[in-house]
Structures are given as structure tokens and as C-alpha cells.
Amino acid sequence: MSQITYVTEEGLRKLKDELHFLKTKERSSISRQIAEARDKGDLSENAEYDAAKDAQGMLELKISKLEELVSNARIVDESQLDTSKVLILCKVTVKNTKNGARMSYTLVPENEADLKSGKISINSPIAKGLLGRKVGDVCDVTVPSGMMQFEVVDISR
């Protein structure tokens, strides 16, 4: 059963670009490796041939998964999002009630998460704890290191 994945336009473009690269460049590269290994003689004892065939199998699996992901992707229309509560693609600023530290995160689909640029997965513990909250709400979030308490300070697009 296929699972619908919500992505941004940028995220879908990146997935399609990666799929195109794998189909055009990587497939031909692995085909060349297999041909070179085949030219070296006896295939029953040819480790290069076995390695190239394994790499081909892994590549085809990755292509298949990406094709399924792209075909089941749905673009989230950012202009239709309600910023009165924390939702996917919202930028939320929270304050740690214990130490007063403020952090800003953008909640994105899992495959677009990048902590360095402040994008966290909608499936992360922090995002799950913040979903549906409004400005001023205080929520307890269970993280791997224990329980943290955050106050929602701001929500924007």
C-alpha cells in the first residue's frame, strides 16, 4: 500500500532531480562497470563483476523507492496554511521554559529535514509535541534526553 508524502515544491524538485541523475548517470556508470568486469574473463570467480551486479541491484532498488515517493508526493500549498497554530511548513519560535533559550524551527516533511538550516522533520519528537499548539501555549515534549517544556512564542510562514 502506497503512503502519501507531503512535500514542498522545492522538495519535489530535489527528488525528481535525484531520480533523473540516478536513471541517467548512475545506471550508465554501473553498466560500464559490469561490462568491464565481464571483459576480464571467468565470471564465476570475478569479484569485480559480483560487486558491480550488487551495486546495480541497490541502485535499482533506490530508483524504485524514489519513483514511488515521487508518484505519491502531494505538494503542500503554503499560501493556504493557517498560522494561528503550529502546522507543517510553519516557522515556530519556542522558548525553553527551564533556561529561557529561544529556538526557531520550520516544520518540514521528513525527507526535507536539515537541522543546520533550522528545518526539523514533522515526525521528530519536538515537532510532534508542538503540532496544533497556538502562541502562548506551553507544552511538554518528550525528547531522547527526557522531558522538556516549551512555550510557543511565534508562528509564521
Image: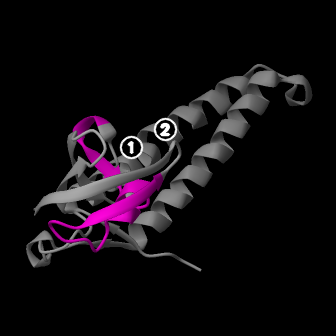
Residue identified by numbered label 1: 21
Tag 1: amino acid: Phe
Please identify the quarter of the rendering in which residue 78 is found: bottom left
Please give the count of numbered marks on the rendered protein.
2
Q: Secondary structure at mark 1?
A: helix
Q: Is residue 124 magenta?
A: yes
Horizontal relation, residue 108 to residue 125: left or right:
left
Q: Position of residue 84 (x, y in %)?
A: 12, 75
Q: Which residues are magenta?
A: 116-142
Vertical side of 146 occupied by 83: above or below: below
Residue identified by numbered label 2: 26
Q: Position of residue 6 (x, y in %)?
A: 34, 69
Q: Nearer the viewer, residue 101 or 156?
A: 101
**Quarter occupied by the N terminus:** bottom right
Tag 2: amino acid: Glu
**Within-10-Å neighbours for mark 1: few <14, some 14–19, many 20+:** few
Horizontal relation, residue 77 to residue 24: left or right:
left
